[in-house]
Image (cartoon, rainbow, N blue to C red):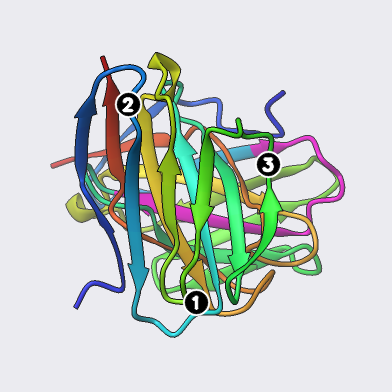
């Protein structure tokens, strides 16, 4: 019973392609996030959604578009992939916006060739 | 600009001894601090947190100390166990909670038998 699950776990693709990473949480949390862990190992927030509404949108290229069909899902779509997009992307959720700890998924390792 | 710094990329400690992981921050607006533990190929898992109104929080073998004047926090693990071998991330937030956590680069703790 994985609390926060993301698919796929590994993704290898060519530059210029479009890809999506899906995330689902079964914790009943209101807020979901996407974080990126880059080659320097920094975990940086990309987006935050609360009850399907975008709350945080850090400086992320327009090629990245999150979509939240319902509060249990937050998918990340990336257009025109670039080499610099190679990273591990973590989905996370929290019970309330701005309160408490985050629960993370296992991460999705994206490699752009 | 690293607002949360973990200056030791790795730390090796003998089993049974105390492990001390350090974290420094530069943003004086941070008021909530968390430690996450991460095993390879898994997402970070929440370990312990502390609000800026406290200077110590204890949970079993884990204690977090906060020195606001020095903008420094530390995580103490005692006694250290082999299962504690992991990467530990320090994280900080403004506004008291999980929104927009800023992470350090992590410290890889290795517990030697």
**Is A54 displayed left or right of A77 in the figure?**
right
In the image, the segment drawn in magenta is B24-38
Q: Residue at x 25, y 45 (%)?
A: B85
Name the image quarter holding residue A79.
top left
Chain label for disc 2: A
Residue position for label 1: A71
* SS class, disc 3: loop
Label located before the other in sequence (2 or 1): 2
Label located before the other in sequence (3 or 2): 2
Mark sitting on residue A58: 3
Q: Nearer the viewer, mark 3 or mark 1?
A: 1
Mark sitting on residue A17: 2
Foreground of the two, B102 or A59: A59
Q: Which residue is drawn at 33% across and 48% down?
A: A21
Foreground of the two, B75 or A5: A5
Chain label for disc 1: A
Does the magenta stretch mainly form a helix, a strand or a loop?
Answer: strand
Question: How far, Cα to Cα, is label 3 from label 2?
Answer: 23 Å
Question: How far, Cα to Cα, is label 3 from label 1?
Answer: 20 Å
Q: In this view, does B97 lie above or below A67?
A: below
**Is A69 displayed left or right of A96 in the figure?**
left
Q: Which of marks 3 and 2 is in front?
A: 2
Question: Residue B63, percent across and down?
Answer: 52, 62
Density class for disc 3 (Cα within 10 Å; few <14, some 14-19, many ≥20) is few
Foreground of the two, B68 or B104: B104
* B32 in the magenta segment: yes
Q: Can residue A48 be seen in this view?
A: yes
């Amino acid at each position: 019973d994985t609390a926060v699950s993301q698919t796929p776990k590994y993704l290898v693709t060519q530059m210029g392609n479009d890809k999506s990473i899906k995330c689902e949480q079964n914790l009943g949390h209101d807020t979901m996030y996407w974080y990126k862990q880059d080659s320097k190992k920094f975990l940086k927030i990309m987006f935050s959604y609360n009850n399907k509404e975008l709350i945080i949108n850090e400086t992320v290229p327009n090629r990245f578009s999150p979509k939240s069909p319902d509060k249990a899902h937050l998918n990340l779509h990336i257009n025109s992939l670039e080499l610099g997009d190679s990273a591990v992307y973590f989905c996370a959720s929290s019970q309330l916006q701005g309160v408490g700890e985050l629960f993370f998924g296992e991460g999705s390792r994206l490699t752009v060739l | 600009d690293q607002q949360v710094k973990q200056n030791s990329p790795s730390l090796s400690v003998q089993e049974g001894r105390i492990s001390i992981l350090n974290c420094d921050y530069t943003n004086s607006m941070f008021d909530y601090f968390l430690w996450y533990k991460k095993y390879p190929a898994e997402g970070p898992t929440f370990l312990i947190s502390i609000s800026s109104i406290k200077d110590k929080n204890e949970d079993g073998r884990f204690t977090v100390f906060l020195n606001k004047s020095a903008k420094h926090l530390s995580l103490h693990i005692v006694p250290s166990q082999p299962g504690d071998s992991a990467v530990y991330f320090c994280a900080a937030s403004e506004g008291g909670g999980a929104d927009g956590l800023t992470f350090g680069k992590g410290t890889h703790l290795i517990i030697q038998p």
